[in-house]
Image (spheres, helix red, strand yellow):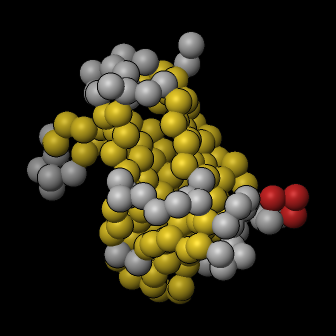
Amino acid sequence: MARREWSEDFTRSSKEWFFTGGAGFDFAKGLARRGKGNAWVCNTTGWNAINIWRPVEPNRTYTARAWLRLSPTLTDGYFSVRNDKENRPDGNFDVINEIKLIGPGPANPNHDDYNLYTFDFDTAANDRVLLYVGLWGVGPDAWIQVGEVSLNASS
C-alpha cells in the first residue's frame, strides 16, 4: 500500500536503495546536513545515481523534496522521478518530472551549504515511481551529497 508521506535521512542503512556507478552512503563522517548520515554520488565518467522505488497512490499529485549539496564542478546532475512503465526502446522509464542540477548552488551556511530542491509531479496511473539523484560524469570530478529526501501527497 502506498504511503502518502515518506522521508529518508540516511541515519540507518536501507536495503531499498540501489546504486549506479559511483554512489553510496556515508555515516559519521561529518558530511550530513542533520544527524550522522548522508548519501552521495560522485564520478568523472558515466551515469552515477542513488535510486529507490517508492509506492505512490495513482492519480495524485506528490511533492518531491531533497536537501542537496553540489560540487562546483557539477554540470549535469538530476533530481528526478520516473514512471514504472518500461516503454522506451532503451529499456528505461520516462521522466515524470525533474530538476537539472548545476553546482555549487547558493551558499547556505545555516544548513552546511545543503539547499532544498523541490518539484511537484502527477503519478497518473503509476502505483510506484523511481526516485533518484544522479549525475553524468563529464570529465572533472563532480559530486552530489544527499542529506534528506521525501515524497508527500497533496491532500
Which image quarter: residue 53? top left
> Can residue 77 be seen here?
no
Q: Residue furthest top?
A: 155
Residue drawn at x 24%, y 38% is 84
Tell me where residue 62 appears, x and y as whole percent: 50, 27
- Front residue of 47/67: it is 67
Q: Quadrant of the N terminus?
A: top left
Tell me where residue 138 appears, x and y as whole percent: 45, 79
Q: Residue furthest left?
A: 89
Q: Quadrant of the C terminus?
A: top right
User: Along the horizontal axis of the image, is 63 left or right of 104?
Assistant: left
Which image quarter: residue 23? bottom left
> Can residue 12 be seen here?
yes
User: Along the horizontal axis of the image, is 126 left or right of 31?
Assistant: left
Residue drawn at x 53%, y 85% is 141
Number of disc labels: 0
Tell me where residue 9 appears, x and y as whole percent: 59, 53
Q: With respect to residue 116, does 35 lie above or below?
A: below
Tell me where residue 92 appears, x and y as whole percent: 21, 51
User: Along the horizontal axis of the image, is 74 left or right of 94?
Assistant: right
Residue drawn at x 55%, y 19% is 154
User: Along the horizontal axis of the image, is 104 left or right of 152?
Assistant: right
Q: With respect to residue 131, does 6 lie above or below?
A: above
Q: With respect to residue 92, does 71 lie above or below?
A: below
Residue drawn at x 66%, y 79% is 29
Q: Residue furthest front?
A: 12
